[in-house]
Image: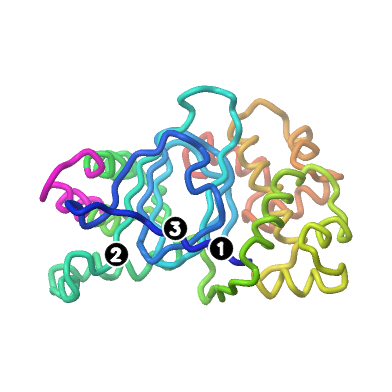
């Protein structure tokens, strides 16, 4: 899959980009950029793709995504106004000077930015504090903007409850000739994961032969297509379990699984928990 290179714009009075988005289709495609991205979802939920990681995202999430790591947030269509509120900061690692991060006092931030190549999600109680710092940075003027970003990064570095999302060793090889093919595969799969998608159908979307599709997809995404679509189904099931509106059997079929046994099997394989355990942990605040 060829993610698109996104050019992050800044102006003459700012050394990095910090903005608020209120529409769901801002940069809503598989993309990458040399800037590190710090993002807070005040409102919004949907499917999240970072490197080879697939999971749901929701209001309150805070993430740090490293330089040139491909990513994509696909918001759920709600039909409601004011359903999206996202604060996002893009910055180059050396925007404050090529040797600044070599200062001994900044070793924690330097280490954090190196770890961001694996995609970092804040999972602990510190989320609210870090989210507030991100919002303050977006709103700040002058030198306080730089100080705010540093405070947000320090808070993440000090946070004891974070998780990395991308597999160690994941590398993406960008090929211009594949600019749109894998994005088309992603879009079709996300839109139709509740149905049975035949090899012939998805190969047709990719505009390659069925015999070539499986090898092609695995070589680009580092996982079989069957694993990819089951991760999307499980991610959707996780959202439904958190919503608590359906019972587990209903969630099984609503997520695109044909039988209860395979649902349990793949859910535990991907999350490490049974659906019931996942729901209980979420209620208790441990999911």
Depth check: give the residue in front, 208 or 65. 208
Give left or right: position of 269 versus 64: right
Depth check: give the residue in front, 258 or 46. 46
Q: Nearer the viewer, mark 2 or mark 3?
A: 2
Badge 2 crowding class, 10 Å Cα cut-off, few under 14, some 14 to 19, many 20 or more, is some
Q: Residue at x 52, y 41 (%)?
A: 25
Q: Report, in whole angstroms, how far the alpha carbon at label 1 lies from the one at label 3.
A: 24 Å
The reply to whether discs 2 and 1 touch (Cβ–Cβ < 8 Å) is no
Q: Which residue matches tag 2?
A: 92
Badge 1 crowding class, 10 Å Cα cut-off, few under 14, some 14 to 19, many 20 or more, is many
Can you tell which mark lies on residue 3? 1
- Provide the residue span drawn in magenta: 137-152
Nearer the N terminus, badge 2 or badge 1?
1
Quick check: is 150 in the magenta stretch?
yes
The reply to whether discs 2 and 3 touch (Cβ–Cβ < 8 Å) is no
Q: Residue at x 86, y 60 (%)?
A: 199
Principal secondary structure, stretch drawn in magenta: helix
Q: Report, in whole angstroms, how far the alpha carbon at label 2 lies from the one at label 3.
A: 22 Å
Q: Residue at x 74, y 67 (%)?
A: 224
Image quarter hosting the N terminus: bottom right
Q: Which residue matches tag 3?
A: 163
In the image, residue 69 sits, relative to residue 147, either above or below, namely below
């Amino acid at each position: 899959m060829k993610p698109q290179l996104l050019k992050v714009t800044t102006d003459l009075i700012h050394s990095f980009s910090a903005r608020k988005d209120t529409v769901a289709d801002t940069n809503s495609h598989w993309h990458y950029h040399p800037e590190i991205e710090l993002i807070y979802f005040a409102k919004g939920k949907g499917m999240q793709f970072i490197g080879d990681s697939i999971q749901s995202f929701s209001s309150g999430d805070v993430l740090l995504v490293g330089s040139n790591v491909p990513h994509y947030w696909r918001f759920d269509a709600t039909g409601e106004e004011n359903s999206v509120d996202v604060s996002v900061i893009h910055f180059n690692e050396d925007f404050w000077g090529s040797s600044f991060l070599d200062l001994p006092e900044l070793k924690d931030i330097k280490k954090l930015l190196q770890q961001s190549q694996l995609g970092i999600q804040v999972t602990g109680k510190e989320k609210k504090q870090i989210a507030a710092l991100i919002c303050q940075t977006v709103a700040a003027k002058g030198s306080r903007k730089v100080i705010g970003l540093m405070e947000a990064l320090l808070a993440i570095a000090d946070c004891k409850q974070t998780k990395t999302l991308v597999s160690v060793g994941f590398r993406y090889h960008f090929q211009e000739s594949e600019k749109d093919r894998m994005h088309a595969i992603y879009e079709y799969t996300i839109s139709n994961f509740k149905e049975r998608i035949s090899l012939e159908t998805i190969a047709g979307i990719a505009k390659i032969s069925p015999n070539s599709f499986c090898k092609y997809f695995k070589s680009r995404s580092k996982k079989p297509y069957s694993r990819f679509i089951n991760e999307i189904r499980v991610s959707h099931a996780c959202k439904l379990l958190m919503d608590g509106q359906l019972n587990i059997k209903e969630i099984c079929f609503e997520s695109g699984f044909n039988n209860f046994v395979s649902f349990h099997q793949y859910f535990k394989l991907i999350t490490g928990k049974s659906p019931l355990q996942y729901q209980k942990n979420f209620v208790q605040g441990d999911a």
